[in-house]
């Protein structure tokens, strides 16, 4: 395991703002280099403040493509849809939002269609962490984590929450991954992730550049005994090595 630097902010709002600032910095750099910025966003409640903070910034949104990491099968506009929160934040920005086609009558073919429309690389992928150690919609005991030959798969069927998700192979398209993990309820799964507990799907995510933005509650279980190679980066302490900030 390579070293992991976890940036620790005072609370969830501060962590969300920090994550938004990181994404904005990567976006500006990509557009300044003459490239479109391709971002993949996960769902859930945790990233909503990050979405809102990012969407409020004055950025070259016309050069941005937003893809979905995962989505639930539900009607368009449903509160259960991750797309609903993404659109609520970003529709007004002018960014191009590429939605997972979960309204399709043939979901298996829809996964292939979404896969075919993915970019060669994502500049940045945002991930969260569930209480059971899932990330994206890669759940423990579900078939999706075992799909190794596709970029997109159906997920959550074993839980009665059918959906669509990027697979490990799809997530590996990321040049960089930013994890946003906040709240004391996430302390145990985060500790398991940092310990490389192979029983949780989040451990299967691989990327050379991974950044963790957390808050005080989320690192509660790591304060007294962090696994070797795991470092908590608080403001006022020594920052991580270049490339991991």
Image (cartoon, grey):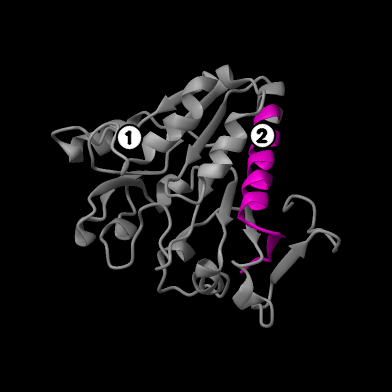
Give the residue drawn at x 53%, y 35%. Answer: 39
Image height check: is 231 above or below 71?
below
Inspect the magenta stretch and tell me whether residue 24 lies in it. yes
The answer to whether residue 137 is left or right of residue 58 is left
Image height check: is 192 above or below 214?
below
- Which residue is identified by label 2? 24
- Provide residue 222's location: percent of width, then percent of height: 64, 76
Nearest to the observer: residue 184 or residue 151: 184
Contact? badges 1 and 2 (CB < 8 Å): no
- Which residue is identified by label 1? 100
- From this viewpoint, which residue is outermost toward the bottom? 225
CA gap, disc 1 to disc 2? 24 Å
The answer to whether residue 243 is left or right of residue 142 is right
Tag 2 or tag 1, which sits nearer the N-term? 2
- Provide residue 194's location: percent of width, then percent of height: 58, 70
Quadrant placement of the N terminus: bottom right
Give the residue drawn at x 85%, y 64%. Answer: 237
**Image disc number at residue 230:** none
- From this viewpoint, which residue is outermost toward the left? 105
**Prevailing secondary structure of the magenta residues:** helix
Inspect the magenta stretch and tell me whether residue 108 lies in it. no
Nearest to the observer: residue 167 or residue 120: 167
Total of numbered circles in the picture? 2
| Residue 174 appears in the rendering | no
Q: Which residues are magenta?
A: 1-28
* Quarter residue 86 falls in: top left
Element type at marker 1?
loop
Give the residue drawn at x 67%, y 23%. Answer: 58
| Residue 104 appears in the rendering | yes
């Amino acid at each position: 395991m390579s070293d992991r630097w976890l940036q620790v902010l005072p609370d969830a709002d501060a962590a969300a703002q920090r994550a938004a600032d990181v994404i904005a910095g990567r976006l500006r750099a990509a557009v300044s280099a003459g490239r479109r910025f391709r971002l993949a966003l996960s769902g859930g409640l945790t990233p909503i403040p990050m979405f809102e903070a990012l969407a409020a910034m004055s950025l070259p949104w016309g050069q941005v493509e937003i893809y979905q990491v995962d989505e639930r099968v539900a009607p368009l506009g449903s509160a259960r849809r991750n797309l609903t929160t993404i659109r609520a934040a970003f529709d007004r920005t002018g960014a191009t939002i590429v939605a997972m086609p979960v309204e399709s009558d043939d979901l298996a073919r829809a996964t292939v269609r979404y896969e075919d429309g993915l970019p060669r690389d994502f500049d940045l992928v945002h991930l969260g962490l569930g209480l059971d150690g899932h990330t994206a919609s890669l759940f423990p005991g579900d078939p999706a984590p075992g799909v190794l030959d596709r970029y997109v798969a159906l997920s959550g069927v074993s839980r009665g929450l059918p959906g669509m998700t990027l697979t490990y192979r799809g997530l590996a398209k990321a040049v960089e991954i930013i994890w946003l993990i906040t709240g004391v309820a996430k302390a145990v799964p985060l500790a398991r992730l940092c310990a490389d507990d192979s029983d949780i799907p989040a451990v299967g995510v691989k990327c050379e550049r991974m950044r963790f933005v957390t808050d005080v509650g989320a690192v509660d279980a790591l304060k007294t005994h962090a696994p070797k190679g795991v470092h908590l980066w608080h403001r006022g302490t020594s920052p991580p090595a270049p490339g991991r900030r």
